Structure formats: structure tokens, C-alpha cells
Amino acid sequence: MMPTPVILLKEGTDTSQGVPQLVSNINACQVIAEAVRTTLGPRGMDKLMVDNRGKATISNDGATILKLLDVIHPAAKTLVDIAKSQDAEVGDGTTSVTLLAAEFLKQLKPYVEEGVHPQTIIRAFRTATQLAVKRIKEIAISVKKDDREEQRSLLEKCAATALNSKLIAGQKDFFSRMVVDAVMMLDELLPLKMIGVKKVQGGALEDSQLVAGVAFKKTFSYAGFEMQPKKYENPKIALLNVELELKAEKDNAEVRVKCVEDYQAIVDAEWNILYDKLEKIYKSGAKVVLSKLPIGDVATQYFADRDLFCAGRVPEEDLKRTMMACGGSIQTSVGSMSDDVLGQCGLFEEVQIGGERYNFFKGCPKAKTCTIILRGGAEQFMEETDRSLHDAIMIVRRAIKNDSIVAGGGAIEMELSRYLRDYSRTIPGKQQLLISSYAKALEVIPRQLCDNAGFDATNILNKLRAKHAQGGMWYGVDVNNEDIADNFQACVWEPAAVRINALTAASEATCLILSVDQTIKNPRSTVDGPPAGRGRGRGRPHAH
């Protein structure tokens, strides 16, 4: 007699387990890597993603591409997550981290199919990662901080390396200088929010400029605005969070009046309140008035008569950046407008850039903030420039905080690969095979760099292996001459933190995917039907 099968889960639940499950997870991760594989390196291609609303995004940044791909496969989501974490932590190297993780899994697939226990593999990988990170720290070259010139040239080279693989690689010298200037203006903590990026369509990329201070788009303004001066030397700046216009009676207030004079008194009171506020602002000596809330037409004309400049509805972050740059503080009332709450800057002016007018605050005393104004033709192009500069800014911040650097262009990966291969020969057991497969997987970065540039990858990798075995530690792919070169001499540098983070994230993701051997997916409840089993009577029609 057949034993009755035990039904534990709701029908339609998808369960798969064991080795086939592992292999299918590994295959899913390969597919993800295929999506970003060709974007790696200076000869990488760009991807054009169109979302469901038809908005097109052109990008070369691994994290951006993976964010926009709507990945449903649970195991493959891990790769998206490590790319995001790499983006948040270091800013660059998002494509390489995804590739590394996928390649690790690819090298392990035969072992999994032959029945090596995942835990053995995970143990070997943890050892290998520790060794690799230790090796990076040993060979990384630290930069002398005291020599400003040298530190500056190093930072520019790191920024140029980060911009090498982006759309704006042609102008990388121009932009790397701009990025280093921008980061150098910040205070010790290097807060990212203090670098504002404003995009203005039109003009050439070279028209982009860095403003030492704050710039924001001219806000909506009322009549009377034309009469206000557009330029001040050393003005005082009032930052408000106050509405300067007549308020309509709201909240259904009921006022009973006996005669017209009473009504007039109410109207006068409203006007007096407004004029009182304006008077106080004028008396405080402020020349530029910025408010988060609207500034009405009466106020605009009042200020224009007295040669003041005002802008209402300034976005909050711009107001905050102005506060950080010019000093002072944001006031919620105009009662105490003393000198210490007013900001100050060297020059205020309104300038026409492209089709927009921008308000500039330059020569700020406390300037720990700056604004990059990007110009360019197409909107997608400017978006991509913005993302590329974000990567470069993050890299420069990292390089200031961690002053050790390694050579990019596949050099560090080849060196680690050689080191681990030599190490694996000194140990017995399965670990030997697994660590050497880790070493082999590291070669995916230089190989992909060659493939993307259209070189013969096998040939170049053989040259690299030979060179590293002879002790040429910093040799990597030379994309310009289809050969190998000492990338340290060629100034292809990146902070060691980028590589350490990429290796640890990739191997953690690998271990995570390997340790999953079963997926249980609940069936989707039908969307249109009402959910069963709720309400009275457990879904049975109840008697009326």
C-alpha cells in the first residue's frame, strides 16, 4: 500500500533543493554578470536602459545598471546588493565586484557538481580572501600627506583612473582637476552633501565650472524683481523660513464687524504685520534675503525700492548649503535679526547660464562647500556625467582618508592571483584545488579588460603571468598599445580600499550563494480575486 504523501506546503509552492538548486543559482548569477560584463574598463561599452515609463538612461556604472534591471531571481539579487554596497562604500569598482563574484561561482561550479561539500569550499574561500587582503595591505604604496603637491597629483591620478572607463574619458584631465579642487574645499569630514551638482543644458562639456561657494537656480519671482540690483560686494545675507506675503484668512475664522472702519482696521492690521516684518529685515542691514517660503509681490517691491535682493521658495538643501558657506543661521521669525544670525559673502551676483539664471555666492568666509555646474548637450549625457563625477568624488575622498594606493588595470588582480597560486601549492587536501580556483577567478578582470578592448586575451594573460612570476609586481593590461605595461609608472592608480572592499564583498556574496541549498517560494495569491479565508465565516457565504 502506498504511504500517503505528507503535504506540508500550500499547493503551487515551488521548492527545489540540493545540488541542482545550487547550480541553478550559480547560472542565474552568470546571467547578471553577462549584463554588466562589457562595461568594464576604459574600452567598455555603455548600456541603454528604458524603464516602464519610457525614460531612457545611458550608463556605464555597474551599480546603476543593476539597480535599473528589475532582478527577480532571489540568488542573483545578492550580486545587485554587493554592487550597491560597493557604490555606497567606495563609489567605484561596482562592475568589477559583480564580475568577481560571478567568476568565483563559475570556477566553483564543477566542484559543486562533483559533490564537494559547500562548507569546504566556503572555508577555503574565506582563507583565500584573508590572504589576498593581507597581501594588498603589504604591497600597497602609501602616499606622503605632508607634501601637498604630491598628494594633489596622486589624487588627480586616482580621479582620472576612475573617469577612464566613463563617457567623459576624453575630458578626464579637466574633470579630475575639478573634482580634486571640489573635494579639497571641504572640511575634515568630507561630507558629500556639501558638493552640489547643478545641470544646465546647452554649451559644451568644457563650459562646466566649479563655483567656490553656492550657486542655485533663480527662484520664482514676482513683479518688482527687475528693479532689484543683481550684484553686491560683501553683502549681508538673511536666511529665513518665513512667509512674506499677505495671508488669506483661513480656518474659517469668523469676524463680526459693525461698521466699515472695523473692517478697515483688520485689513490695516494685516498690512502692518507684513510691513513690520519687512521693516525689521531692512533695518538688520541684510542686502540679500533668501527664504524657504514664498516672498510675495508686495515684499518684492518693498525690497526693490530699498535696493535689496530677495528670493523666495529656495530649496531647503540649497538654503542649508548657503548657511554652511556664508555663516549665519536660518531664522523662523524676524524678531531677532542681529548681526550674528546674518551670513556674509564676498560677492553675490546673478548670472545667466544657458537658458537659466543662477544666483552665485562667491568668496564665502566659511566656504566648506562648492557647486559644480555641468553643461552638456543631451539630458542623458549630463546625467551620466553626474554619475561619473560622483564616482570620481568618492574615489578622491577615499584616497584622502586612506592614503595607500595600488595599480589598477588588472595589475593587482594578477599579483594576487600569482601569490595565491604559489600559496596553494604549499598546502595539501581539497583546499589546494579551491584556493587555486580562487586565484584563477581573479584573472577575470584583466581578461575582461582585454576582451572589451578587442585584444587577444589569452596571449596578454600569458605575458602577464610570466611577468608576475619574474617579479614584475605592477604589470597590467595596457589598453592603448595592446600590450602589458607597468601600470604604476603609467599612473593608473586606485585606492587600496576599493580593491579590498571589492574582494571581501565578492567572496562574501559567493559564500552566501553557496550556503543556500533550498529555495521555498510561496505561490502568489491571485491579484484580482478577494483574498480567501478572511472575514466572517471563513469564506463561506453567511446567511442573511
Image: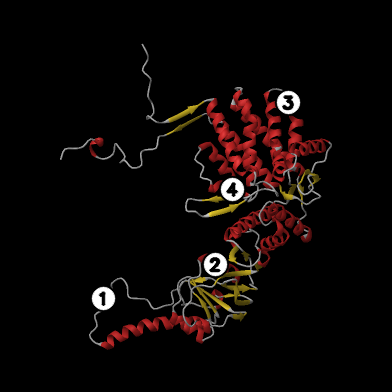
Q: Are marks 3 and 1 in contact (CB under 8 Å)?
A: no
Rendered location of residue 426, percent (x, y): 76, 26
For marks 4 and 1, give the one nearer the viewer.
4
Whichever of callouts 4 and 1 sits on the residue coming sooner in the sequence is 4
On the image, numbered disc 3 is attached to which residue? Answer: 427
- 369, 476: nearer the viewer: 476
Seen at 82% across and 41% down, the residue is: 472
Name the amino acid type tagged 2. Answer: Asp
| Count of numbered badges drawn on the protein | 4
Name the amino acid type tagged 3. Answer: Ile
C-alpha distance separating marks 2 and 1: 39 Å
Q: Are marks 4 and 1 in contact (CB under 8 Å)?
A: no
Q: Tell me the quarter of the picture where residue 503 sits.
A: top right
| Residue 254: mark | 1
Q: Tell me the quarter of the picture where residue 515 sits.
A: top right
| Residue 63: mark | 4
Q: Residues within 10 Å of mark 2 (few under 14, many from 20)?
A: some
Q: Residues within 10 Å of mark 1 (few under 14, many from 20)?
A: few
